[in-house]
Amino acid sequence: MKDAAARRYSTGAMIFHWAIAILVIMNWQIAERAHHLEGAEKMAVYGYHKAWGILILALTLGRLLWRWMHPVPPLPADIKRWEAKLARALHVVFYVLLIGLPLGGWLANSLSGREIDFFGLFTIPALPVGENKDLGHTIFEAHHTAGSIFIYLIGLHILGALKHTFFDRNGGIFRMLPFGKVPG
């Protein structure tokens, strides 16, 4: 059993992974719905999108700290070299997006002269960047595009996990779950 545990991610890594994954998908859906609304209702829904984004940023920073203190398990021995490189590159891109998207959103809000309300608990002040609504709009557009790319990359990640689980039978998704078989 200890051998199988060494091939799984730690419980903390699993919690961070699934919490962030759920929040990212949820937040993407919130943004998609807000995009089709008007006026005050649109701004209220985007307010939730912004607050969840800040929470995703905080959890991602926590996850990075956790990862630094808890080594990741080795990849299965049967992973092809190109698959390992793709997986590592994708994880780096995920971290860049998990940090960059919330920071970009915060920056765009700041340039538009807006603070971020964190679920009514407190207000996150605008960054000290001055007001430039045109630049803020450009960053919002880049934020939207990067968010769409992120969703496609998440799909790629899910397909890879399913391939490794059901075709390669090397544990795939079970490395990030507390159950299921992770072969030696």
Image (tube, rainbow, N blue to C red):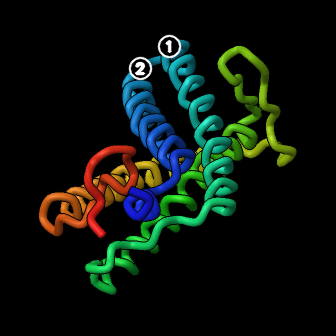
What's under tag 2, amino acid-wise?
Leu
Q: Nearer the viewer, residue 46 or 150?
A: 150
Asked if the residue at tag 2 contacts the one at tag 1, i.e. Cβ–Cβ closer than 8 Å, the answer is yes
The answer to whether residue 116 of the structure is visible from this angle is yes
Q: Position of residue 119 (x, y in %)?
A: 65, 18
Query: CA separation, marks 1 and 2?
Result: 7 Å
Q: Residue at x 27, y 65 (%)?
A: 183
Q: Residue at x 67, y 42 (%)?
A: 58
The answer to whether residue 136 of the structure is visible from this angle is no
Q: Position of residue 140 (x, y in %)?
A: 56, 45
Q: Pointer 2: what residue?
A: 37
Is 150 on the left-hand or right-hand side of 16? left
Q: Residue furthest left?
A: 167
Secondary element at tag 2:
loop
Query: In the image, is residue 113 above or below residue 67?
Result: above
Instruction: Give the label on residue 41, or none.
Output: 1
Query: In the image, is residue 118 above or below residue 62?
Result: above
Q: Residue furthest right?
A: 128
Quadrant including the C terminus: bottom left
Q: Nearer the viewer, residue 48 or 3?
A: 3
